[in-house]
Amino acid sequence: MSRKCSNCGESIADDSLFCPKCGSYTKDNQKPRSFPLKWIAIAGIIIVLAVVAGYAISNHNSKTDTTLVMLSDSNLDSSNQYRVALKDAGNNPLKDKFIVVEFGNNTYKLKTDGNGTASINLTLSDGSHEIKSYYKGDDTYNDAHSSDIIVK
């Protein structure tokens, strides 16, 4: 292999200390390798990104589970009041949360009270009826569903 003189550009042998054309000292013109430092930096960045991604994934599903339970008797009395309770995994009531109730072709949006309950008076004909309730969840709590049969 050969290299070039930094002074005149003449090709010189790798083991020459002086340029045969201009006589200048031909110290090693090669740049010091930063190879290990560069790869160590890249590996460090990858490790940091992996740690951040792992933390984000582990906290992604840190929501609390919820349950939605019908409180009304399945045989409604004359009040026709349908009541549901929304609670977290620790059986604590969830207040000020919105529950969607579907009955027949109607959809109602109810808000839970301080006890985590929501209610609605339904006009029912005789027979059995399916009522579906949904809590869609939020930043803190997972969603919950309930499907109940009511008889009048």
Image (spheres, grey):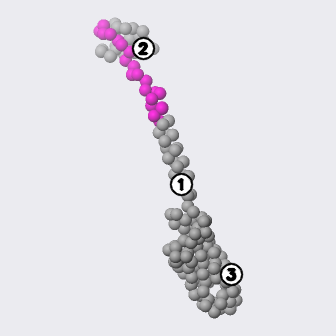
Q: CA distance from mark 2 to mark 1?
A: 58 Å
Q: Which residue is mark 1?
A: 59
Tag 3: amino acid: Ile
Which of the two discs, 2 and 1, labels the residue nearer the N terminus? 2
Which quadrant, please, contains the N terminus? Answer: top left
User: Is residue 99 left or right of 23 when viewed as pictured?
Assistant: right
Q: Secondary structure at mark 2?
A: strand
- As for residue 95 lying within the magenta part, the answer is no
Tag 2: amino acid: Ser
- As for residue 29 lying within the magenta part, the answer is yes
Compared to residue 18, the image places residue 91 above or below, namely: below
**Magenta part of the protein: which range?**
22-42
Query: Could you tell me residue 49's position as x and y percent?
Result: 49, 44
Tell me the residue at 55%/58% (across/down): 62
Tell me the residue at 55%/76% (across/down): 115
Rendering quarter of residue 38 = top left
Q: Which mark is residue 2?
A: 2
Compared to residue 102, the image places residue 40 above or below, namely: above
Q: Secondary structure at mark 1?
A: helix
Tell me the residue at 52%/44% (across/down): 50
Q: Main secondary structure of the magenta part?
A: loop
Pointer 3 local density, CA inside 10 Å: few below 14, some 14–19, many at least 20: few
Mark 3–mark 1 CB contact (< 8 Å): no
Which of the two discs, 3 and 1, labels the residue nearer the N terminus? 1
Tell me the residue at 30%/7% (across/down): 23
Query: Could you tell me residue 10's position as x and y percent?
Result: 34, 13
Q: Nearer the viewer, mark 3 or mark 1?
A: 1
Q: Nearer the viewer, mark 2 or mark 1?
A: 1
Compared to residue 139, the image places residue 115 above or below, namely: below
Q: Secondary structure at mark 3?
A: strand
Q: Count how many numbered circles sit on residues in the image.
A: 3
Q: CA distance from mark 2 to mark 3?
A: 90 Å
